[in-house]
Amino acid sequence: MIRKNVDSSNIKSVGYDPSLKVLEIEFDGGGVYQYLNVPENIYINLMNASSHGTYLNKFIKDKYPYREVSP
């Protein structure tokens, strides 16, 4: 999945696959997580948020199932 770098204190890059509804987030610490069944508007809102980390914590974490793909 192709990810775009973002300006964030804890997120390095974000990618999205609309056909699978998978949101992929690479953290500054090196971990990569895929959040499943994420609607495209959530990805768009994340990318447009003034704080990517705050948006992630409020609207994505604990709302969608996820898997770690790289420690």
Image (spheres, grey):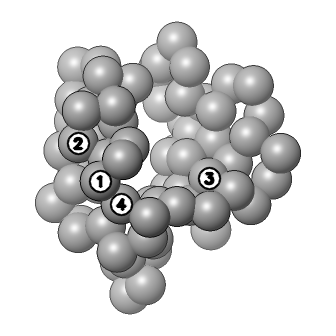
- Residue 7 appears at what percent x and percent y? 47, 20
Q: Amino acid at mark 1?
A: Lys
Q: Residues within 10 Å of mark 2 (few under 14, many from 20)?
A: few
Marks 2 and 4, how far apart at CA: 9 Å
Marks 4 and 3, how far apart at CA: 12 Å
Marks 1 and 4 in Cβ contact (< 8 Å): yes
Residue 3 visible (yes or no): no
On residue 59, which mark appears?
2
Q: Amino acid at mark 4?
A: Tyr
Q: Amino acid at mark 2?
A: Phe
Label 4 element class: loop
Specify which label sits upstream in the sequence, 4 or 3. 3
Specify which label sits upstream in the sequence, 2 or 4. 2
Q: Residues within 10 Å of mark 4 (few under 14, many from 20)?
A: few
Closer to the camera: disc 1 or disc 3?
1
Residue that lies at the very extreme toward the right in this rendered image: 71
Query: Front-most of 25 and 65?
Result: 65
On residue 33, which mark appears?
3
Marks 3 and 2, how far apart at CA: 15 Å
| On screen, residue 5 above or below 34 | above
> The N terminus is located in which quarter?
bottom right
Would residue 38 appear left or right of 49 to someone viewing this image? right
Marks 2 and 1, how far apart at CA: 7 Å
Residue 68, quarter of picture: bottom right
| On screen, residue 13 above or below 44 | above
Residue 5, quarter of picture: top right
Residue hosting label 1: 63
Marks 2 and 1 in Cβ contact (< 8 Å): yes
Instruction: Determine the residue positioned at 39% across, 24% down.
Output: 53
Residue hosting label 4: 64
Residue 8 visible (yes or no): yes
